[in-house]
Image (cartoon, rainbow, N blue to C red):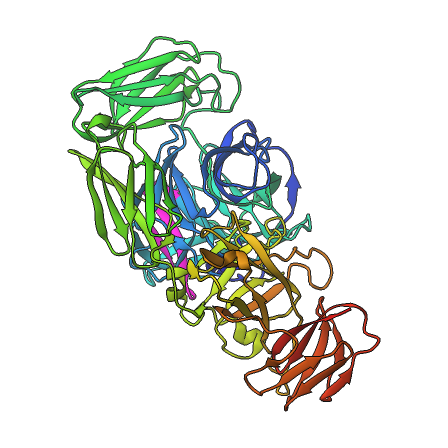
């Protein structure tokens, strides 16, 4: 992701000492390369089964790590900081990412079964933590049966144990220098890799109650971790794998790709710690995992048997009987070995419930054969079943099936949507009814009813609905959403709709965007990242001080070449839409924009019948100019105005501003923008023309007779610019001849106020 998401990672990874030797990275194939591994892409340019730069959990093989198959796609703004899997079940710490310059919003810890495809939220992992806390990585400690995470904020980092039931983090230790990605081997030893490419073992000290980072070896050529990444052991081979995303690497791609590195550790007794003097460290480059992709949550399935033992079952599922007493498991026997080769024979299989064996099938079965098991009179609640196949070469891996016995509450509704009426005062809420229970238990859709709660006023607007639609009336103009609650006698689930603005349209002017209060701004104004590249409007930051030397509050559009991901960024399409307003017939209205920018930016003004880019009609286009400074070297805001057309008068409409600057990919301004919108006002009156215009301070009367430009009154700075922002001339007299000026549109700036001139 962008650098704002990398702070915790970068600060955690301190360089180690001097003295150990770098290990040269060889190239070669991984043993038994047809085996699969899994992870989460926050972005990636290519998948084998879907198109687009999307986010989600994937699987791939060691011999072809670039062939990523999406197995659980998330929406374009939901990613995970860190994740780890236990026997095929992921535990992940997700977040919503809405802007490249804003803090992500944590979501509850999620559980995802890669075998069944089922997933759900468990609990608030971020509860009680600093708002800037970010997990860097997670790993599963098999020996001690615990899920570990590393993370922190503001240079306060620690190692945490993660509660698998609700996501709660319990701090175990402060973290000494050494690494921000972690992995635990089968014997409980904890390892990390640092920003400098060194491999460390963390050894716990009972005296200091913290971990000491023992420097081991350096992975030659891989330094400066750039983005989210992950590391994990293959517990079948005991080798360590690092999905590396480093700015400095042998391919000189500046972290464009995630690359898989295999690390072989020397043979050591289970209780012994590693040292830099041990012999036998080896490092191998396996291949590219994803281009322009951040890959976290690396998981490598393992078995206690051999590579020629049966592999994974397929089509695992469960159902609960109508009387909620019995659980039926269904599955298909594996067709490949654990190594991914064709499977010749299966000697039998065992079935476990909650760790206890409940069935044994000791007769040979054909690979791919369907299997069924009915577990009768099961205690109500959630149970874990494991199906384990074996042959003469040993046991295969576990195939977990999480089943729910008993009557179940409804699953969450889907397709929840809100349509705002043309009058902006009515809404229609629709959704699709759940067809199954939340946990997969016994469920009767006919018994489901719905409550609707309007937020944020928390008003229950409907109770016990038996249909999937509802109409609401809203008076106060502000931003709302709805919580749709599906319920039955076993419980309830809830889903919240996307937010929207509705209520009585504004009928008093001026209508102004209050950039000094971002919270109030969001209550009625709508900002949209319409190209979905995550680089969009930013409100309430203090970044302008470093650039402009003051603390003017503004809406900002910022692209920095130091944080932009070239493959992600698109031509600007960022919208700021005003709340609906009533425009009276026979009254003149204008739109005023106060802007300053470091680079030329194209800004357009629109009107439309609803709070959406769809259906908008363009009113005007401006090119916000290059910087203009006063005598104290302060960059000035310039004013751009346009009239609202006759078609809007006598209607209720929304005025919108769009940044529409094409991305610059070459030259001095490549991937660079900084625009401040210091004021957006919709008011009665005519836009400032070039004749008889009165500025507010100081007072000027500006006239232009086609050749002579006259500025009456005192002024400190005046200049004429072309539409591309280049200065044409400095104006230092009250009366200036413009003869010889080429025909076209120009911008006159007088003490920070801007006016259009058209030379014919």
Seen in the picture, residue 270 relative to 328 is either above or below; the reply is below
Point out residue 678 in the picture as x, y percentages from the top left corner.
52, 71
256 in the magenta segment: no
Look at the image and give the residue range highlighted in magenta: 140-162
Q: Residue furthest right?
A: 740
Residue at point 23%, 53% (across, down): 458
Q: Nearer the viewer, residue 97 or 579?
A: 579
Q: Quadrant of the C terminus?
A: bottom right
Q: Which secondary structure class fits the magenta region best? A: strand
Q: Nearer the viewer, residue 179 or 661?
A: 661
Could you say which quadrant of the image residue 2 lies in? bottom right
Residue at point 55%, 63% (across, down): 557
Q: How many marks?
A: 0
Seen in the picture, residue 351 relative to 157 is either above or below; the reply is above
Q: Nearer the viewer, residue 440 or 727?
A: 727
Seen in the picture, residue 721 relative to 412 is either above or below; the reply is below
On the picture, is 214 further left or further right than 699?
Answer: left
Is residue 316 at all visible to an observer of this figure? Answer: yes
158 in the magenta segment: yes
Point out residue 688 in the picture as x, y percentages from the top left corner.
59, 74
On the picture, is 431 further left or further right than 239?
Answer: left
Q: Residue furthest bottom?
A: 714
Point out residue 569 in the picture as x, y percentages from the top left corner.
60, 52
On the picture, is 289 further left or further right than 706?
Answer: left
Point out residue 87 in the picture as x, y percentages from the top left corner.
37, 33
Is residue 273 at all visible to an observer of this figure? Answer: no
Q: Nearer the viewer, residue 524 or 490?
A: 524
Seen in the picture, residue 187 relative to 50 is either above or below; the reply is below
């Amino acid at each position: 992701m962008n650098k704002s998401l990398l702070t915790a990672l970068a600060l955690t990874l301190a360089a180690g000492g001097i003295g150990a030797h770098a290990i040269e990275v060889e190239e070669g194939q991984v043993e038994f390369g047809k085996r699969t591994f899994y992870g989460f892409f926050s972005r990636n340019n290519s998948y084998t089964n879907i198109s687009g730069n999307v986010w989600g959990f994937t699987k791939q093989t060691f011999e072809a790590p670039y062939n990523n198959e999406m197995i659980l796609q998330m929406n374009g703004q939901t990613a995970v900081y860190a994740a780890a899997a236990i026997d095929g079940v992921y535990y992940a710490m997700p977040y919503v990412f809405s802007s490249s310059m804003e803090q992500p919003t944590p979501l509850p810890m999620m559980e995802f079964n890669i075998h069944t495809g089922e997933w759900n939220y468990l609990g608030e992992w971020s509860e009680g933590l600093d708002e800037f806390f970010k997990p860097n990585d997670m790993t599963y400690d098999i020996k001690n049966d615990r899920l570990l995470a590393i993370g922190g904020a503001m240079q306060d980092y620690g190692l945490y144990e993660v509660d698998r039931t609700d996501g709660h983090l319990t701090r175990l230790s402060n973290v000494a220098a050494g690494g921000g990605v972690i992995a635990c081997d089968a014997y409980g030893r904890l390892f990390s890799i640092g920003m400098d490419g060194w491999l460390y073992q963390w050894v716990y000290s009972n005296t200091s109650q913290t971990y000491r980072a023992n420097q081991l070896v350096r992975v030659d050529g891989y330094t400066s971790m750039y983005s989210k990444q992950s590391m994990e052991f293959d517990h079948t081979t005991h080798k360590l794998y690092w999905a590396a995303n480093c700015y400095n690497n042998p391919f000189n791609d500046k972290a464009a790709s995630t690359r898989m590195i295999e690390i072989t550790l020397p043979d050591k007794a289970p209780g012994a710690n590693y040292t830099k003097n041990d012999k036998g460290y080896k490092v191998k480059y396996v291949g590219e995992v994803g281009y322009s992709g951040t890959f976290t949550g690396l998981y490598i399935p393992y078995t206690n048997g051999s590579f020629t033992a049966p592999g994974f079952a397929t089509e695992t599922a469960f159902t609960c009987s109508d009387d909620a007493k019995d659980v039926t498991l269904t599955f298909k026997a594996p067709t490949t070995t654990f190594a991914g080769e064709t499977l010749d024979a299966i000697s039998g299989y065992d079935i476990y419930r909650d760790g206890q064996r409940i069935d044994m099938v000791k007769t040979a079965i054909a690979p791919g054969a369907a299997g069924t098991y009915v577990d009768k009179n099961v205690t109500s609640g959630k149970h874990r079943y494991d199906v384990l196949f074996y042959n003469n070469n040993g046991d295969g891996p576990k195939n977990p099936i999480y089943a729910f016995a008993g009557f179940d509450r409804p699953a969450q509704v889907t397709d929840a949507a809100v349509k705002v009426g043309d009058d902006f005062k009515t809404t229609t809420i629709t959704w699709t009814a759940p067809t199954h229970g939340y946990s997969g238990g016994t469920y009767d859709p006919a018994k489901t009813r719905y409550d609707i709660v309007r937020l944020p006023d928390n008003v229950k607007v409907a109770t016990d609905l038996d249909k999937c639609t509802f109409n609401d009336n809203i008076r106060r103009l502000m931003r709302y959403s709805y919580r749709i609650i599906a319920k039955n006698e076993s419980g309830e689930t809830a889903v919240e709709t996307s937010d929207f603005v509705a209520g009585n349209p504004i009928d008093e002017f001026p209508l102004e965007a209050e950039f000094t209060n971002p919270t109030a701004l969001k209550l009625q104004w709508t900002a949209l990242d319409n190209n979905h590249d995550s680089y969009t409007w930013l409100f309430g930051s203090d970044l302008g001080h470093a650039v402009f030397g003051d603390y003017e509050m503004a809406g900002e559009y910022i692209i920095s070449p130091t944080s932009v991901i070239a493959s992600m960024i698109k031509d600007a399409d960022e919208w700021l839409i005003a709340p609906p307003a009533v425009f009276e017939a026979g009254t003149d209205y204008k739109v005023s924009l106060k802007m300053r920018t470091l680079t030329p930016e194209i800004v357009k003004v629109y009107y439309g019948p609803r709070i959406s880019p769809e259906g908008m009609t363009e009113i005007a286009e401006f090119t916000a100019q290059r910087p203009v400074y006063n005598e104290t070297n302060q960059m000035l805001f310039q004013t751009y105005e346009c009239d609202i057309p006759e078609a809007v008068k006598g209607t209720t409409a929304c005025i919108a501003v769009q940044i529409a600057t094409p991305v610059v990919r070459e030259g001095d301004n490549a991937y660079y923008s900084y625009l401040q919108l210091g004021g957006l006002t919709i008011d009665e009156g005519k836009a400032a023309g070039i004749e008889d215009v009165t500025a507010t301070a100081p007072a000027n009367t500006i006239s232009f007779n086609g050749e002579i430009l006259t500025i009456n009154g005192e002024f400190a700075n005046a200049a004429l610019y072309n539409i591309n922002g280049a200065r044409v001339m400095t104006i230092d007299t009250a009366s200036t001849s413009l003869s010889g000026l080429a025909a076209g549109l120009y911008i006159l700036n007088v003490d920070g106020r801007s006016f259009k001139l058209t030379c014919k």
